[in-house]
Amino acid sequence: MSAGRFSGRILHAEVEGIELYEEQMNLRVEQEFHAPPDALVFSFDMSENTLYLLDGETRNAWVTPENYREVAVVIKQAAQWGQPLDAFADLVLTPLRSDNCRSVAASLSDMLTGAFDGQRHMDAPGVAQTIVSDCFYLLCEAPIGDGRRSRSTVQAKRVVQRVKEVVDDCPEENFGMTELAARAGVSPRSLQQSFLRYAGIPPIVWLRNRRLNAARRDLLGAAESGVTVAEVAMKWSFWHLGRFSQSYHALFGEYPKTTVKQGYRA
């Protein structure tokens, strides 16, 4: 969702039904997350020193900022650790902050790096229990962020989610902002503010970048499908080939024909 060549990595480890991962990305990326049933997920946003809790009912979609770094703990069958799931329902997707968020996240990151380098054994006695204890301790001490800010973020997320559902139903259509606002049940100004607050980019940029990413997927498969650049551009509602090529280059750092050649080489 932002210009340049993508660079990122994911580290992952698992012990006693506890999954641990760290994700780093240099560009804005639109993601969707479905938490496993009967699980609790502790997601640490390293840039904002913030903890987000997700449960098995969570269906979260968001656009990560540039240079994003997240450490997460997925506690499967969380009730087996003596923690009733419904006790934390009010904290789901609420920004939680405490002085210890950063230190716990850094410790989890070091643990993953050590496991990746072969310097740390995740199956050592007490590792899983320590991870679980540290996470639940944070829930007890972390004050909830400013209520008005939290509510406005939740409202913005709902608007973005409604727009995303509309666009997903008709992925090849180029919606106007007035129509999208009407479909989402908000004013055009509220639509703009919601996207800036939740996704960090205006809705028109979000929509164009989604269509450019879809065009890129088609161009990478052009060798097999036999479609031309012009056909792909028009499929995704880019009617001026020169402007399509310029917008494509601005986002991906290469022209559409170059992408097609990559598909041939692959």
Image (cartoon, helix red, strand yellow):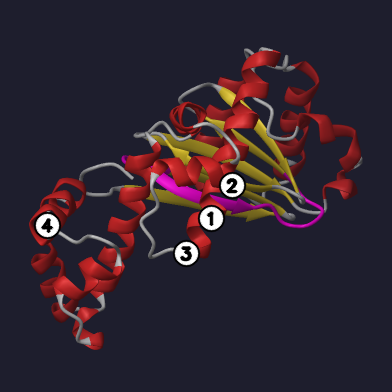
Mark 3 to mark 1 CA distance (whole Å): 7 Å
Left or right relative to 16: residue 224: left
Residue bounds of the magenta highlight: 24-40
Return the residue at label 1: 166
Mark 2 to mark 3 CA distance (whole Å): 13 Å
- Indicate whether 167 appears above or below 124: below
Q: Which mark is residue 170?
A: 3
Magenta stretch holds residue 30: yes
Magenta stretch holds residue 111: no
Q: Nearer the viewer, mark 3 or mark 4?
A: 3
Mark 2 to mark 4 CA distance (whole Å): 30 Å
The picture quadrant where one finds residue 90 is top right
Q: Which mark is residue 162?
A: 2
| Viewer-closest of 235 and 130 | 235
Going from N to C along the chain, the mark reached first, 4 or 1, is 1
Mark 2 to mark 1 CA distance (whole Å): 6 Å
Contact between marks 2 and 3 (CB within 8 A): the answer is: no
For badge 2, the amino acid type reads Arg
* Callout 1 secondary element: helix
* Callout 4 secondary element: helix
Going from N to C along the chain, the mark reached first, 2 or 3, is 2
Residue 128 screen position, x and y as percent: 73, 44
Which residue occupies 74% across, 35% down? Answer: 92
Return the residue at label 4: 245
